[in-house]
Amino acid sequence: MRKEAENTQKSGSSIQLPASSTGSEGRVKIVFVGHVDHGKSTLIGRILHDTGSLAEGKIEMIQKACAAEGMEFEFAFLLDALLEEQEQNVTIDTTQIPFRTARRRYAIIDAPGHKEFLKNMITGAASADAAILVIAASEGVREQSRRHAYLLGLLGIRQLIVVVNKMDLADYSEKRFQEIEAEYRRFLIDLALEPRCFIPASAKNGANVAESAKGMKWYKGPTVLEALDLMEAKRPDVDLPLRFCVQDVYRFDERRIIAGRIETGTLRAGDQLVFSPANKTSTVHLIERWNADGDDPAMAGDSIGITLTEQIFVERGYVASHQAETPIETNRFHADLFWIARDALLVGRLYDLRLATQEMKCQVVSIEQVMDSSTLETKTDKREQLERNEVGRLTIQTRAPLVLDNHDRIANLGRFVIVDDGEIRGGGTIFGGVYTDRTVAKSKNIFWTEQKITRKERAAQMGHRGAVVWFTGLSGAGKSTIAEALERELFKRAMHTYVLDGDNVRHGLNSNLGFSPEDRVENIRRVSEVAKLMADSGVVVVTAFISPYRIDRRRAREIALEGNAEFIEVFVDAPLEVCEARDPKQLYKKARAGQIRQFTGIDAPYEPPEDPEIVVHTDRQSVDESIATILEQLLPRLKADEPSD
């Protein structure tokens, strides 16, 4: 098998086609969480023992080792031994520990409770169907108990069992159990989490784990295993829109096989797919499987390969979908982010972002709200950093188009992690993204021509990246003046740049358009397409348009991102009364006199940007001050990509 040169897999990595789906219907994945030393590992070890899920002779071997060391045997040692084997990749799955009851199979996802290991929970709990949260009766509800619950809610895990462990250390007291239950229920209500049950237990003694505790006759509820058997297995997400995440591209027997995993939806031979972020389409020729019929549809959870009828460029990180239900493509989105690193997250600092098979540079551009995950106290004052164990509601910008979904629609593509120096520093969920209708019919006889010169090659020769710098603001705010001044400053720096001015464009390209809402939409669409092509050539395109509607500016961003161009929105902000007082072209005067209809700010609306990359206030900033503000934030974005090793 020979991998194509276009594959982006790092050198030195092993090459493996993904294994096919194992058909795990009915299996429930459980994440175990709890404060350090509250007995989570002991509970897991006890469950493995009581369900007969350990290899023959395993417990005797550990008991013998404990005796040799003069140590008392503990059930937690069973988990330690399994995790040691896991690190050596000897006997068990590298991420999950299996066990089964008489009813069905389970998989344990272990999430260590200490703060240092919360990152394991962010990635491990994300795929769980349900959670068991362990609280020690001897210590009660602790900071981590609350923090873990917040993370479960953040990740959308709603099936929750709370085990009040170490009841033997509280003399099996009903009163102590009820105190912990009442306190923790009050906290969970604020998170909109409704636990299935609270179970008093002693994992060390096996009380209420597999069998009812004789010393707690006051408790009439289920044991831990009985409660687990009442949990619901998460159904495969076949009814959701298709999301096929590309892992790699291979050439095998003269076929180009696109390998990946179906996160949601169903895929069949003959389906027409849209590959984002390139927005290129092709039809599935065959579904390549291992020991399975290629004519059968592939469903959520399946790892497969596909071949296409028309060969198009596809690489790792692309996401395939159906035309009618495409994901969001953007380089700017809103998220709730849980930060776990000792060093604070800093606004403006570059980090690595991973979402599905995508990985790219990103930076936080603003923090709108901060919450303490253990107290749920919320602060809305402006912040420039996020401290350890805080949750931030923030805006993130990536260096290239990112394919994503809102977490409440498709969770698989609505969560991500932030990485720094190879370590996971935080995890988050995405909200508020706007979906675009891409069902407008296009001719099947028009094909995008791939350029022979890459963006990186152009940037290396020019010394900067191509980009679209989109100025928006009222007439008279100073857009054209500042755009021309910016062009001059970039030109002085030997950058290739050009201004697309609203009036100039209407002299030629858009001379057939008026100022009705429909014509305004088409005006911006045409300009956006031209700007995308110019940015693709490596030029820094500066546009100066009122572009009054947010949806049109959002579409301009999407068009730029379709061409993999950086898009920077600059809001030239000035109050209407200031703009009208300036009135350089006497347009406001004519509008007030009724000589111009549908004039923005007078009898047509202007929708200011909700979240622009850059804002200048021309009512109190000079042209030079405005340019200084823009350059400070713009120049770092235009730096050519670092050459690869």
Image (spheres, rainbow, N blue to C red):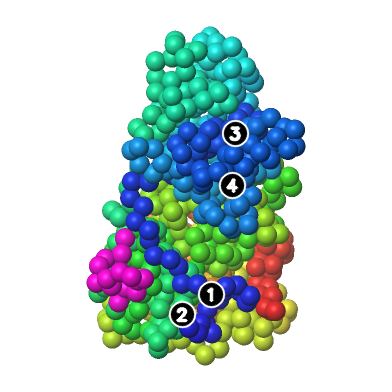
Q: CA distance from mark 1 to mark 4?
A: 27 Å
Closest to the observer, 631 or 86: 86
Q: CA distance from mark 3 to mark 2?
A: 46 Å
Q: CA distance from mark 2 to mark 1?
A: 9 Å
Image position of 23 (left or right of 203): left
Q: Amino acid at mark 2?
A: Tyr
- Circle nearer the N terminus (3, 2): 3
Q: The C terminus lies in which quarter of the figure?
A: bottom right
Q: Is residue 290 magenta?
A: yes
Closest to the observer, 100 or 559: 100
Q: Which residue is mark 3?
A: 75
Image position of 155 (left or right of 352): left
Residue 332 seen in the figure: no
Q: Which residue is mark 1?
A: 15
- Circle nearer the N terminus (3, 4): 3
Q: Secondary structure at mark 4?
A: helix
- Circle nearer the N terminus (2, 1): 1
Location of residue 144 in the rendering, given as x and y in whole percent from the top left corner: 62, 32
Q: Is residue 329 magenta?
A: no
Which range is magenta? Answer: 286-299
Q: Decide: few, some or many residues near mark 3? Use Cα within 10 Å; few <14, some 14-19, many ≥20.
A: many
Residue at point 61%, 52% (across, down): 85
Q: Secondary structure at mark 3?
A: loop
Q: CA distance from mark 2 to mark 4?
A: 35 Å
- What secondary structure characterizes most of the magenta part? loop
* Number of numbered labels in the structure image: 4
Q: Verify CB contact (< 8 Å) between mark 1 and mark 3.
A: no
